[in-house]
Image: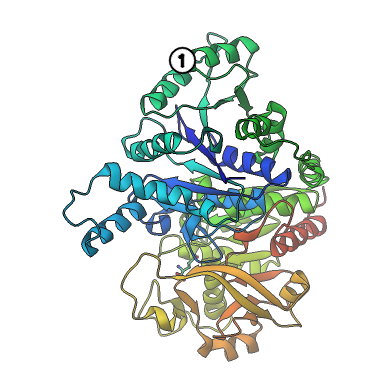
Amino acid sequence: MNTKYVFVTGGVASSLGKGILAASLAKLLQARGLRVTIQKFDPYINIDPGTLNPYEHGECYVTDDGAETDLDLGHYERFLGVHMSKANNVTTGKIYYTVINKEREGAYLGKTVQIVPHITDEIKRRMLLLGKTGKYDVVVTEIGGTVGDMESQPFLEAIRQLQWEMPEDDLASIHLTLVPYLSAAKELKTKPTQHSVQMLQQAGVFPDVIVCRTEKELTPEIRRKVALFCNVKPGHVIQSIDAPSIYQVPLNMENEGLDKMILDHFGIKDLPDPDFSRLKAFLSKLYHPKYQVDIALVGKYVELQDAYKSILESFIHSGAANECKVNVHTVQSEYIDQSNIEDKISGMDGILVAPGFGERGLEGKVLAIRYAREHDIPFFGICLGMQMCVVEFARDVLGFAEAASTEVNPATPYPVIDLMEDQKSTTIKGGTMRLGAYDCVLDQDSMAYRIYGKDKISERHRHRYEFNSDYLGKMEAAGLKATGRNPETGLVEIVEIPSHPFFIGVQFHPELKSTPEHPQPIFVAFVKAAMQYREENRSN
Ligand code: GLN
């Protein structure tokens, strides 16, 4: 069988859940035994989102192989349980970079280099690249942005060309739109969908299925109307109704018959029915929790949910594993001070201090950590959160009042967190941090070892600064232990306070590897510790 390609475009509005739709379809096909991967094409000129502020584009998701990618790749991994790689996220920037470099090398000597065919050829090459590896039966490609954006035109043009170049039953196209409900008129409105599909068709891309995001059930008449006006087969207009959890969407799409439509289009027959018993067991725990906890997520990008996407998802996975609803309360670290810390944090059963960059909100993080340490509240620090717990400990327990990370205070007399040696000569900002999966060896006498149940783990990183081992002796003597280290470099990856009920800081990003079926162990243990704290400290 030839590798099959599905393209997912979006119209009317952004944030309709194109990534979730792409991941859901991939999950349905995977559950029927096909080898499936997903890739995302983003229309911006940055080479990757690594240089973007989270406010611009949400969390930057890091893969095992060290690619800094769009957060939708996180959804792909969480839904499929397979690892993404550098090749799964392509930006306009990467396309142009390749073409311009080739031009300089003389690859197009004598020719005018143009969007069509040179840019579109490079887009097509990348669209087919994963399929050419022979590792996949189906490659689902999500096109970022919204149809009608000037920026995504070349991507649509590339799909248009592929439609003519490939056998019809090797390529399918799905368009996700919004059917808004006007409460004043008590009606669902299809006009925006009609316009969006018209625009897509003007670009030469003809959708095989239209998925309508909606808050109310679509009636058969509405489905027929959209099919008629948008020129798709009756029955190929389906709904994606607001769901209580994104992990419900694959099941909803199966009910709507999305996978069957795509398989019919590809002429693939006789696949086994999917077995979703594990997903259903997860959802049942998620929907019927027996317990609850309140966790503070202390960070500086809290106004934008997407900035901490993987952390929030990890709480959903680890909450379900504990049959516990995790109420995450975001706390803007910039506004925490001595006078309000009690108000903001004292009612919490656990405190997570988030990753981040730069100076803003750092002192608030230090105060939150001190509160957790002194009040025996379960504490979990990730990356910058771990670095700040080292700073806090140095200041308050070791008495080094001016201790700091050199990221914000290069002149500190106590650089307890310092630039990694190999970062000192780096001047380029893009793609030069310590990125991707690294091994970590755990101390057998540690909470980390008990949590993971093994002594060798691998987690993903994204940082330039590290624990300064010059201070290790003093820290350990005073009660902050380094319990996980990189076996090659000796870098400290985990710190703990064994005398505290649950106090752990990790230099890596455990949230990037959590999935519903394999919740990340530290998150699971943290939620459990929070449940215990709540039981011991709250009478009701
Ligand atoms: N800013 C810190 C560093 O570069 C932490 C990074 C992070 O939290 N991802 O080391």
Q: Which x, y percent locates residue 191?
A: 46, 15
Q: Which of 54 and 171 is in front in this view?
A: 171
Say how the picture is coloured: rainbow
Q: Which residue is drawn at 52% across and 78% down?
A: 395
SS label for mark 1: helix
Q: Residue at x 51, y 36 (%)?
A: 167
Q: In this view, does 225 lie to the left or right of 404?
A: right
Q: Is residue 107 left or right of residue 429?
A: left
Residue at mark 1: C-beta within 8 A of ligand 1: no
Q: Residue at x 76, y 82 (%)?
A: 445
285 shown above or below 66: above
Q: Which of 212 and 318 is in front in this view?
A: 212
Q: In this view, does 208 lie to the left or right of 53?
A: right
Q: Which x, y percent locates residue 160?
A: 40, 34
Q: Is residue 427 left or right of residue 183?
A: left
Q: Nearer the viewer, residue 232 or 425?
A: 232
- Residue 456 visible to the viewer: yes
Q: Which x, y percent locates residue 442?
A: 69, 80
Q: Which x, y percent locates residue 303?
A: 48, 46
Q: Which residue is drawn at 76% across and 70% down?
A: 451
Q: Nearer the viewer, residue 370 or 40?
A: 40
* The furthest residue to the left: 110
159 shown above or below 51: above
- Give the amino acid type for the residue marked by disc 1 in the picture: Lys
Q: Name which quarter of the figure residue 531 lies in.
A: bottom right
Q: Name which quarter of the figure residue 522 lies in.
A: bottom right
Q: Mark 1 points at which residue?
A: 191
Tell me the crowding category of disc 1: few under 14, some 14 to 19, or many 20 or more residues within 10 angstroms, Cα based: some
- Residue 46 visible to the viewer: no
Q: How many labels does the image show?
A: 1
